[in-house]
Amino acid sequence: MSGPKTGLEAELRKAVRGDVGFGVTSRALTTMDASNYRRVPLGVVAPVDADDVAAVLEVCRSHGVPVVPRGGGTSIAGQATGTGVVLDFTRHMNRVLSLDPEAGTAVVQPGLVLDRLQEAAAPHGLRFGPDPSTHSRCTLGGMIGNNSCGSHSVAWGTTADSVRELDVVTARGQRLRLGQEWAGAPAGLRELVDGELARLRTGFPELPRRISGYALDALLPEHRADVARSFCGSEGTLGVLTEAVVGLVRAPRARALAVLGYADEGAAAEAAAGLLAHCPLTVEGMAADLVPAAAALPRGGAWLFVETGADSVAEARARAERIVRAADVLDALVVTDPAGQRALWRIREDASGTATRMPDGSEAWPGWEDCAVPPRRLGAYLRDFRRLLGSHGLRGTPYGHFGDGCIHVRIDFDLLTEAGVARFRRFSEELADLVVAHGGSLSGEHGDGLARAELLPRMYGDEMVALFERAKGVWDPDDLLNPGVLVRPAPLDANLRFSVLPRKPVDVAFGYPADGGDFSAAVRRCVGVAKCRTTSASGPAVMCPSFRATGEEEHSTRGRARLLHEMLAGEAGGVVTDGWRSTEVRDALDLCLSCKGCRSDCPVGVDMATYKAEFLHHHYAGRRRPAAHYSMGRLPEWLRRVDRLRLAPLVNALASVRPLAAVAKRLGGIAAERRIPRLAPVTFSRWLRRRNRERVRGWMSEARTGGVPAHPGAPGQPGMPGKMVFLWPDTFTEHLSPDVGRAAVRVLEAAGIGAVELPGRPWTVRRSQDDEVESVGTSASLGRPRVRACCGLTYLSTGQLDRARAVLRRTLDLVEPFLLPELDEVTEPPAFVVLEPSCAAALRTDLPELLHDDPRAARLARRVLTFAEALERLAPDWRPPALNRPVVGQTHCHQHAVLGDASDRRLREAAGLTGELTGGCCGLAGNFGFEKGHFEVSRVCAEEQLLPSVRRAPEDAVVLADGFSCRTQLEQLAGVRGRHLAEVLAEALDQQP
């Protein structure tokens, strides 16, 4: 650490009571926001109050070090990055200080997340009007700094329209209370405005979404010289906000959502302005390129989402239906059900992430994310915009706030090569001219930042920009606050975050098929949307349980991706310089539960579980691993040895002796708070093997006596099934919960599906010169122990990828005859039913991605079925017994993220099991919750949704938990027995007459 940096850090630690972080992790986490830009700070300070803010400014001013205020880090133009000291308000200054329902105001701190304000206001029938799509993680300070808007701006305006008073500390330590009639204005500001009244009255375009530049026109006498409003949108360049009084609006008691289908985005844009006369709450637009294929939207190629509000559902629906009748649409849908509306709105809100990938999977980037034009000109502007894109050979899919003429778009810029960056600059300059020609603003929501400030003269002219510089000088004469933003800007093609990444693919183990095999491209997926930073999981969502447990950025998916980005940058300018050996990256990944929630919930599909496995593989290459990697990472090996030697009863007896268990846990890196699960005395495979032998003997006996084997479900001897599946002997079902396997066999047979054991010997397939199969046979010799199929889950989760690869290749050898390409032509090729969701997910995704060079891997992945999928696909006419009981529990995180639970939902519904399972993660997550040092985080994760739902459940509720981890967590933390769906159905079958 350099001398000046050391001195600055020491002085800050003396001066402030908040947190001061100058280490690798703190700096790496704040190098980027949600933009294309990257600037490396010297350090980060999390102040506890305004005194801390003033102290930081004083110390930094004495050192000549810039200060950058930062909220949720979701800014899309680069203004939340900086090279000096970053102020992080989210840690301490994040509260609602007071709320006055009568006055309709709230006093808030800058680090308060918007959703927390909405939750505080909702009981009073109030809400904060502006609501960006990042409402679950953006902060009020960031919203004020950028003058954010959101989807309801046609009704409730921008953040500036909701600001009443602001407490601000200037760069020189002056504390001001900003308001109307020049309240709180710094010395010299009024004189500056009085000398430029004519320019300020004529120099700003009239449109609802003008965010670019400084809002100096708010200081005009006819606007009541509103200093607080003028401060909004200044992007942290004028002063540091420490407190705000904001206005709240009356929330409608009922809402309806009309989704209007149009042929294309142009038609939707042309129609949007005409709907404003009906006073809707929203007029949002998006095209088919951003919509999931399964989305239940009306017919069309583009849609407007138009929301109406009223005191009753009937009136809200009536207003929505009037809009439908007034609109010239291909098709329309009106939804009043709140859950249905939330599902539709999620499609729109996820567009900011979805848009980062083109339909063919290529990358797209912000940079021209939110230009705005007068709404009546939106259709013409979009046509010109499309032509400009085509002339540069670029692609992008516009979406956004059509009712306000504000368009978001991510464009497939090449920001990795000099030629691509040059084209990015040319396009930016030409688009700025196009926006101005349509009477628009370069920014309509997210601010100018590093992306557009250089182009402000094209919008305002040199004299107005010079006036902006003079205003900045009045507020911040030392240019201490966020220099290079808005005035005297850095070039728009400087500080690009991709410039430090390696140009050649990194040597990795996984195939990363969605990223062309390039680990750098996989890490680049994280664009900082920060959906992983939500503080509460809603609906079925899972991501990101460790962040919700700790509240620390480094334990979010985004934080980990930032550290990996800096690791890849390495010596080229990265903050992390020791590569795969980095302890900072290791520590950030340590609390990743490998729940895979980000794989489905992250709008850009970041897969941190895979990145973690990859990192651990390299980090521990040739080195001793943590004890848990040997004890739990190689669990299948230990349990097979115990079974081979018939030691399960002895192991259980020893584990029940507390001192011996304590020693075993200490040696194995297992949390002292955990109980070691009991092993089954008879494995599932041994039970199934014996049972099938007995059944075959029964069928043969019937055949010898001239009888016909009974049909399944007939009285007496169970009949020969019509269809057969391989039941996968996953480690958990095999050794720890064979009751689940037995129950599954019972249910499958009742449905006419026979379950057989996987082969226990490797097979060889001999082919002719014409690639025809000549023979298939086993290669094992007499007396050799059986080989077990394994999904490799425990090796994968601990990053033992060489061992995982060997285990999975051996597994493919075992089942190769049932994976022959010729079988793909069969109506019902052999299926492998996997009862443990995490093992099924490993076979579906990790197997083909790790063994990407083995075509058998993809074929096995396609043949894997969950229990519910097997029943639905192979016995579509079978109906389960009716239980007619409520259910509680949690959808397994891997089921949610990888496998999907649609078949499970339909099976539960058919069985009369009512109610929704919670989202989130149980917190045990395989080996995670058993590892030393993870118990508390594991417990907090369970307490978020799973355990409260079980405690609230009615007495007759069925507690469902398909995963062994989930069942173990329920038992050890709540004393509740969770059951696999197969167990519940089997019990019901046994109780039938």
Image (tube, rainbow, N blue to C red):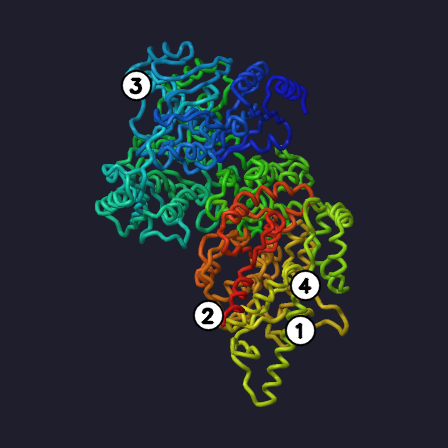
Q: Which residue is mark 4?
A: 810
Q: For the point 50% across and 28% down, which residue is it?
A: 94
Q: Is 13 displayed left or right of 424 in the figure?
A: right
Q: Nearer the viewer, residue 992 or 73?
A: 992
The residue mark sitting in front, 4 or 2, is: 2
Q: Position of residue 92 (x, y in %)?
A: 54, 27
Dot 2 or dot 3: first in sequence order is 3
Q: Position of residue 406 (x, y in %)?
A: 34, 35
Say what amino acid the circle numbered 3 marks.
Answer: His
Q: Position of residue 570 (x, y in %)?
A: 64, 36
Q: Which residue is mark 1?
A: 690
Return the mark for residue 223: 3
Q: CA distance from mark 1 to mark 3?
A: 87 Å
Query: Among all residues in the image, which is located at the extreme front?
Result: 955
The residue mark sitting in front, 1 or 3, is: 1
Check disc 4 and report its element: helix, strand or loop: helix
